[in-house]
Image (cartoon, rainbow, N blue to C red):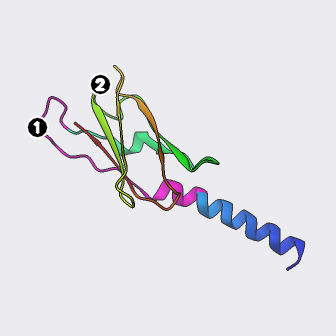
Amino acid sequence: MNHKSLVLLIVSIVVFTLIHSMIFISDISETTGAAHSGFVNEDLVTVSSPDMYGFVTITGSANSVNPFAKIIVTNLQNEDETYTYADDLGAFQTDMLASSLDYLRVETE
């Protein structure tokens, strides 16, 4: 394999990883009947690529969920969960162990 082919292969792998880390996010909201209706605006939720330790950062910008909602993020491949709370603007951020091919579910209570 020559140098040009190797560089192209590496670039392809990086692009594939970046695309899949964003595509395979399954933002699912459920109505729980609690004070917060389960609203998740999936257009305002992003997930980073895994860092060197395998952690991704899930970020919801303002109005991604209801203010002060409890956020539950579940990795559907290994069933790990992480919890956090939205701020007064409906924004949140949390980290969890996940590969770029894992499906994540973001819910509120």
Q: Which of 21 and 99 is in front in this view?
A: 99
Circle 1 is placed at which residue position? 33
Quadrant of residue 10 within the rendered picture: bottom right
- Residue drawn at the location 35% of the way across and 27% of the way down: 86
Residue 67's disc number: 2
> Image quadrant for the C terminus?
top left
Q: Where is residue 20 in the image (x, y as percent from the top left)?
A: 53, 60
Q: Where is residue 53 in the image (x, y as percent from the top left)?
A: 60, 48
The magenta span reads: 18-37
Q: Position of residue 74 (x, y in %)?
A: 35, 49
Magenta: main secondary structure equals: loop
Q: In this view, does 76 lie above or below 34?
A: below
Q: What element carries label 2?
A: loop
Q: Does the magenta stretch include residue 33?
A: yes
Q: Earlier in the sequence, mark 2 or mark 1?
A: 1
Q: Position of residue 98 (x, y in %)?
A: 49, 53
* The furthest residue to the right: 3
Q: How far apart are marks 2 and 1 (CA)?
A: 16 Å
What is the three-letter code of the residue carrying label 2?
Pro
| Left or right: 70 in relation to 99 | left
Q: Does the magenta stretch include residue 30?
A: yes
